[in-house]
Image (tube, helix red, strand yellow):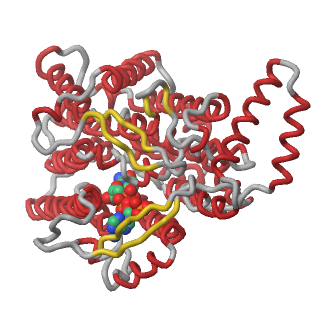
């Protein structure tokens, strides 16, 4: 968990331009190697890498400086390298551990360790008791991913034509480091609606498959998710060398592991519309999130003959969060994941495995421990979740409105206050921007994260206080978002310079006024 935050942390390690001498040496070496098809292929990869470095890093030191201010690192220190390799090796086992602990130890995360310590179990015996990949799971997962690809690519959005206030269809993304503005087909809400309509039609009318299908195949499906996660990351890695979508937006370090994990391409695409980041970030993981919870709910009903109020709370609160994500998918194009991160293992594998398995631990826990909360507890959790959501959404909305209208809007009934700032992109262009200092953005610099954390705590608190496992999420989110604050502020400080200092003087706290 903390490792995943650590993994995200690696995005902002040292930012130094590669030594020109080294590049020259590689060029000469590449020329000498172009004889066999394999060698020609390597040569092509080198050429692409060089082109990207030359274009991305610009011709003057000023441009190198400016380019280095965006996104993830250009070069990697050895400590980061150890972190990268550890995560590549161990992150899948962290997910495995949690899911296995529920399956074999009724969600106790200490019991497996104690048994190992006392010699009552071995790693091999635990492994042997855990189900592996099955054909059924492989077929379910293939059908699931193919269906989501079909919905994403083949059904242009129509919901924006009849849902007032919803922004869908073709939308512009943010300016990339190389100065491009990509177009995106925003149809996530439509995909979510179609998928869930089919789910309910099946559960209540067609009965093609059991609504507990996800829970019943949960561990075999995890192996399928891992296969997809690693396949897509590897494909994106190779693609970045051989046929990048936009070479100017590629970032290379001299380290193959770091490149693999943190990604090289900024916006890898197949064809005009299949955008890896948008697809894998939103679907199949986030569309699946609510279906996974529904499957847990159906399992509770099957096992105990009723559904507990805690399970309903988790389903409702997380469904609000998921629906909010799709309702605001166009806004999501302007968030850090899309605006600043490259597409590598941490996004590809993270979206395929980490998100669907660890963001849904509360529902999984409640299948094994059907907690019925007192009315007071249930109302308290509901209020915490709704207030957290309100803060999260309103804060994000205020920034979005402010940026969209270039400050010509009303925040909390008043004209917004802001700080004017400027920055330079990799193509040398100077751009102007504004930092909002009123509304929730005047309370703290990341009050949206504070709201998100309140909502996360509510999901965990819905599971009662019997076990640690459901609280994994709030610990993970706290580390993730606190680190994200620091990382984002480091980037903003490089980007805006003294203007950012003026902003932090005006709004001194990050998350909680007076505390942090
Ligand atoms: P933000 O939406 O807060 O975006 C940060 C960017 O906003 C900054 O880099 C800067 O970009 C701009 N900005 C910062 N301060 C201001 C200001 N005062 N006025 C105007 N613009 C400003 O961050 P994220 O993209 O990280 O998060 C988006 C949402 O997603 C959050 O609510 C977060 O809680 C949620 N989230 C959820 C996760 C999960 O796993 N559940 C994971 C990560 C995020 P610029 O360069 O444009 O100035």
User: 204 above or below 432?
Assistant: above
**In this rendering, position of residue 326 left or right of residue 429:** left
The residue nearer to you, when weighing 311 against 488, is 488
User: 418 above or below 304?
Assistant: below
The residue nearer to you, when weighing 47 against 104, is 47
User: 14 above or below 418?
Assistant: above
Residue 204 appears anywhere in the view = yes
Residue 452: x %, y % from top left: 29, 60
Residue 473 appears anywhere in the view = no
**In this rendering, position of residue 203 left or right of residue 65:** left
Count the marks: how many?
A: 0
Within the image, what quadrant is residue 219 found in? top left
Which residue is drawn at the image coordinates 36% and 46% (left, top)? Answer: 333
Which residue is drawn at the image coordinates 78% and 29% (left, top)? Answer: 42
Query: Quadrant for ligand 1?
Result: bottom left
**In this rendering, position of residue 316 left or right of residue 48:** left
The residue nearer to you, when weighing 211 against 149, is 149
Which residue is drawn at the image coordinates 25% and 46% (left, top)? Answer: 328
Given the current orientation, which residue lies at the most extreme right position?
32
Q: Quadrant of the C terminus?
A: bottom left
Residue 110: x %, y % from top left: 47, 55
The residue nearer to you, when weighing 190 against 331, is 331
Residue 115: x %, y % from top left: 54, 50
User: 207 above or below 39?
Assistant: above
Residue 507: x %, y % from top left: 34, 80
């Amino acid at each position: 968990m903390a490792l995943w935050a650590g993994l995200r942390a690696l995005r902002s390690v040292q930012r130094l331009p590669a030594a020109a001498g080294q590049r020259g040496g590689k060029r000469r070496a590449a020329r000498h190697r172009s004889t066999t098809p394999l060698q020609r292929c390597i040569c092509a990869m080198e050429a692409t890498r060089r082109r990207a470095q030359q274009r991305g890093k610009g011709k003057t030191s000023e441009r190198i400086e400016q380019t280095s201010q965006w996104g993830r690192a250009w070069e990697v220190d050895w400590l980061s390298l150890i972190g990268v390799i550890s995560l590549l090796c161990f992150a899948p086992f962290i997910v495995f551990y949690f899911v296995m602990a529920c399956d074999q130890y009724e969600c106790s995360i200490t019991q497996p360790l104690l048994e190992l310590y006392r010699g009552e179990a071995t790693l091999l015996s635990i492994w042997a008791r855990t189900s592996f990949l099955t054909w059924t799971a492989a077929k379910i997962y293939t059908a699931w991913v193919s269906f989501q690809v079909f919905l994403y690519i083949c059904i242009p959005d129509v919901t924006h034509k009849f849902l007032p206030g919803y922004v869908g269809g073709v939308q512009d993304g943010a300016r990339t480091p190389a100065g491009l503005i990509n177009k995106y087909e925003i149809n996530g809400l439509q995909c979510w609606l179609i998928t869930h309509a089919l789910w309910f039609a099946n559960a209540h009318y067609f009965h093609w498959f059991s609504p507990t299908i996800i829970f019943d195949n949960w561990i075999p499906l995890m192996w399928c998710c891992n296969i997809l996660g690693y396949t897509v990351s590897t494909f994106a890695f190779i693609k970045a060398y051989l046929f990048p979508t936009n070479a100017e937006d590629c970032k290379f370090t001299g380290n193959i592991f770091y490149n693999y994990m943190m990604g090289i391409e900024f916006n890898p695409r197949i064809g005009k519309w299949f955008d890896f980041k948008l697809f894998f970030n939103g679907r199949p993981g986030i569309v699946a999130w609510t279906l996974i919870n529904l499957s847990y709910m159906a399992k509770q009903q099957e096992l105990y003959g009723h559904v507990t109020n805690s399970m309903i709370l988790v389903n409702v609160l997380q469904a609000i969060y998921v629906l909010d994500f799709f309702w605001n998918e166009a806004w999501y194009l302007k968030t850090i994941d899309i605006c600043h991160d490259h597409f590598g293992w941490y996004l590809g594998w993270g979206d395929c495995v980490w998100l669907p398995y660890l963001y849904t631990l509360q529902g999984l826990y409640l299948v094994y421990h059907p907690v019925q909360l007192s009315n007071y507890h249930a109302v308290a959790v509901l209020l915490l979740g709704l207030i957290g959501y309100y803060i999260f959404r309103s804060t994000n909305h205020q920034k979005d409105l402010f940026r969209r209208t270039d400050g010509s809007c009303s925040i909390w009934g008043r004209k917004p206050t802001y700080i004017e700032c400027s920055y330079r992109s990799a193509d040398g262009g100077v751009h102007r921007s504004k930092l909002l200092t009123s509304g929730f953005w005047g309370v703290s610099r990341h009050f949206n994260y504070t709201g998100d954390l309140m909502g996360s705590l509510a999901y965990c608190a819905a599971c009662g206080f019997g076990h640690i496992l459901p609280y994994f999420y709030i610990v993970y989110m706290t580390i993730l978002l606190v680190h994200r604050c620091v990382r984002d502020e480091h980037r903003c400080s490089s980007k805006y310079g003294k203007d950012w200092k003026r902003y932090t003087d005006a709004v001194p706290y990050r998350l909680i006024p007076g505390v942090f």
